[in-house]
Amino acid sequence: MQEIYLMRHGQTLFNLYGKTQGFCDSPLTELGIQQARQARKYFEQEGLRFDCAYCSTSERAEDTLLEVYQGPYTRLKALKEWNFGIFEGGPNYLEPPRKPGQNSHYDNFVPYGGEHVDQVTSRINQAIQEIVDTHPSKLPLVVTHGGALYCFYLRWQREGDPRPSFGNCCILKYGYDQGEFYLLDWIDPGK
């Protein structure tokens, strides 16, 4: 079974101030840089040596990757965070609330120029699928975003899977076998 590590970026200025951050961007805070360095220490302690690395085109993801990985890497727009439409850059509390029974935003942002959960899930899943298909027998690292990771998790969630925390610099370890992804572990390197 091939393995792939997926990771969320470190804390950003918008995370710190409770602002909605999808396609818009803000820089890592000092804590965000420290979180990324803790993730690098985790990878080193586990003896993990990645054969290739990818990140979204957002600065926060690329800057996180640069703290944890040395070597050539690829930026992919398909790995970007959920597009939250007109809520981008505004306070989180202005976002439309989830409807009763929802485990995601589903179509809540569509009327405001944002993406449907199915759009996010499709593009993140396709990007990660292409990464593993391009690098069979290799160990890839992907740095992306909380909402994108959550969509990927929901797509491949199986009964009995643990519910990961999607905090800054969380790491999800997946196995890939015959076109299927399996959550093997999730790590919070800050704990």
Image (spheres, rainbow, N blue to C red):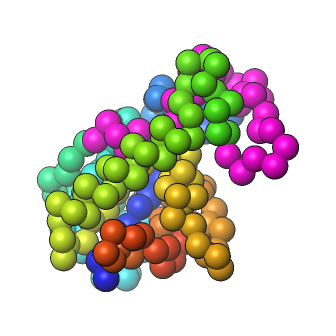
User: Residue 15: horizontal and vertical position, in percent?
Assistant: 61, 39
Q: In the figure, is residue 99 to the left or right of 105? A: right
Is any atom of residue 44 visible in this view? no
User: Residue 50: horizontal and vertical position, in percent?
Assistant: 24, 69
Q: Tell me which corner region of the image, top left, top right, bottom left or bottom right, holds residue 131.
A: bottom left
- Provide the residue span drawn in magenta: 76-104
What residue is rendered at 41% in x and 39% in y? 80
Instruction: Check residue 90 for magenta coloring.
Output: yes
**Is 103 placed above or below 162 here?**
above
Q: In the figure, is residue 100 to the left or right of 16? A: right
User: Residue 53: horizontal and vertical position, in percent?
Assistant: 25, 57
Q: In the figure, is residue 26 to the left or right of 70? A: right
Name the residue nearer the viewer: 170 or 173. 173
Instruction: Check residue 85 for magenta coloring.
Output: yes
What residue is rendered at 53% in x and 30% in y? 115
Q: Tell me which corner region of the image, top left, top right, bottom left or bottom right, holds residue 134.
A: bottom left
